[in-house]
Image (cartoon, rainbow, N blue to C red):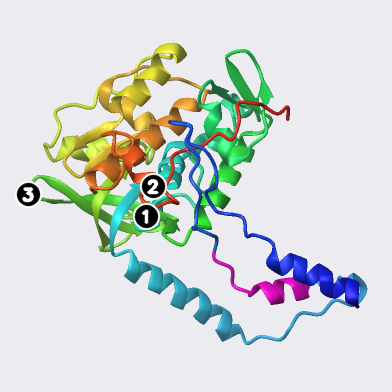
Amino acid sequence: MAAMATALTSLSSSPKPSFLDHKSSFNGTPIPSRFTPIKSTSQNSTISMSLTPPYDLQSFKFQPIKESYVSREMTRRYMMDMITYADTDVIIVGAGSAGLSCAYEISKNPNIRVAIIEQSVSPGGGAWLGGQLFSAMVVRKPAHRFLDELGIQYDVQEDYVVIKHAALFTSTIMSKLLARPNVKLFNAVAAEDLIVKGNRVAGVVTNWALVSMNHDTQSCMDPNVMESKIVVSSCGHDGPFGATGVKRLKSIGMIDNVPGMKALDMNTAEDAIVRLTREIVPGMIVTGMEVAEIDGAPRMGPTFGAMMISGQKAAHLALKALGQPNSIDGTLSEAERVESQPEFVLAASETEETVDA
């Protein structure tokens, strides 16, 4: 018993890991963090659970519940999310690799609320697989530093790295992102239109994705709305729901042309995607392959580094537009010295060492 008490004391007194205790891949500066994940149980109950013997699969029985409790829990929480994010800081439309990277980067600032709108039930876009339904994901250096921050293993080649399965990237960034208290993913929700006020994008018009796909088969099914200070459009290249942000800007006369992406050229394409990521009209930033659609840049095919870095750049453009510390206008280094926001750092790399998958 004395040994157990000593062990419990040691556990309870050990320092808690910080949520963002790492270096920046942009500037290499380590910043201590106070931003820790929210847990639904206390530390004591967590320790108690670890001492509980495993359950017996031969005689397993669940605790009783009323079916109405399940319905109420889901409904109450979702409706509260809809109320909370009806007017928010940043809305990201499209939860592919660029959109997820953008949301991950912005959400490091705990004061910024981020809503992600994704028309599919399963977020991730095309990042669940590599090219031609193959598994591996190729990321050209130096974007591998973003993978270092996420703790994703990869096989090292001279100028690029390879993740053994693309889903490893997507599931990892999603699990880290969605654990943050200032982020809400609304999947199976489509952005049907934009809110525009005084020639500035001010939010999105939303509907259930299945409703959006069936407007021609039913009578009028009106949408809902979400206001925001900044909209980030990461809808990908042309397709059923692709490039919808820039297409809508063209149809309402806010931009002149959407020429579509050119033929594949990886070396030109990835640099162009990052370079051309920008606030295309007041209140709306375009990132990822949607950039290629509006600028006629080459497609890049099955290499994903530009998606990650374009998403990061879009995040810092959004932070700049919100008047927050960012890497675009040089305010980040100053912010790193401010105690009120020590948890805000950029994408990080603890070390340049690499790990074989």
Q: Earlier in the sequence, mark 3 or mark 1?
A: 1
**Residue 230 appears in the figure:** yes
Residue where numbered disc 1 is placed: 114
Identify the mark at residue 106; answer none if there is no mark. 2
Task: Give the x, y percent position of residue 29.
Answer: 47, 36
Spatial CA span between label 2 and label 3:
26 Å
Going by the numbered disc 3, the residue's amino acid type is: Gly
Q: Secondary structure at mark 3?
A: loop
Task: Write down the region rendered in magenta.
Answer: 38-49
Q: Earlier in the sequence, mark 1 or mark 2?
A: 2
Residue 172 lies left or right of residue 80; in this view the side is right
Q: Earlier in the sequence, mark 2 or mark 3?
A: 2
The reply to whether discs 3 and 1 touch (Cβ–Cβ < 8 Å) is no
Q: Secondary structure at mark 1?
A: strand
The reply to whether discs 1 and 2 touch (Cβ–Cβ < 8 Å) is yes
Spatial CA span between label 3 and label 1:
23 Å
Q: Nearer the viewer, residue 135 or 221?
A: 135
Going by the numbered disc 1, the residue's amino acid type is: Val
Query: Does residue 328 belong to the magenta stretch?
Result: no
Q: Residues within 10 Å of mark 1 (few under 14, many from 20)?
A: many
Q: Secondary structure at mark 2?
A: helix
Question: At 51% across and 49% down in the image, what residue appears?
Answer: 32
Quick check: 266 above or below 163?
above
Question: At 16% across and 41% down in the image, what residue appears?
Answer: 282
Q: Quadrant of the N terminus?
A: bottom right
Residue 332: image quadrant is: top left
Residue 325: image quadrant is: top left
Task: Give the x, y percent position of residue 276.
Answer: 29, 25
Identify the mark at residue 198; answer none if there is no mark. 3
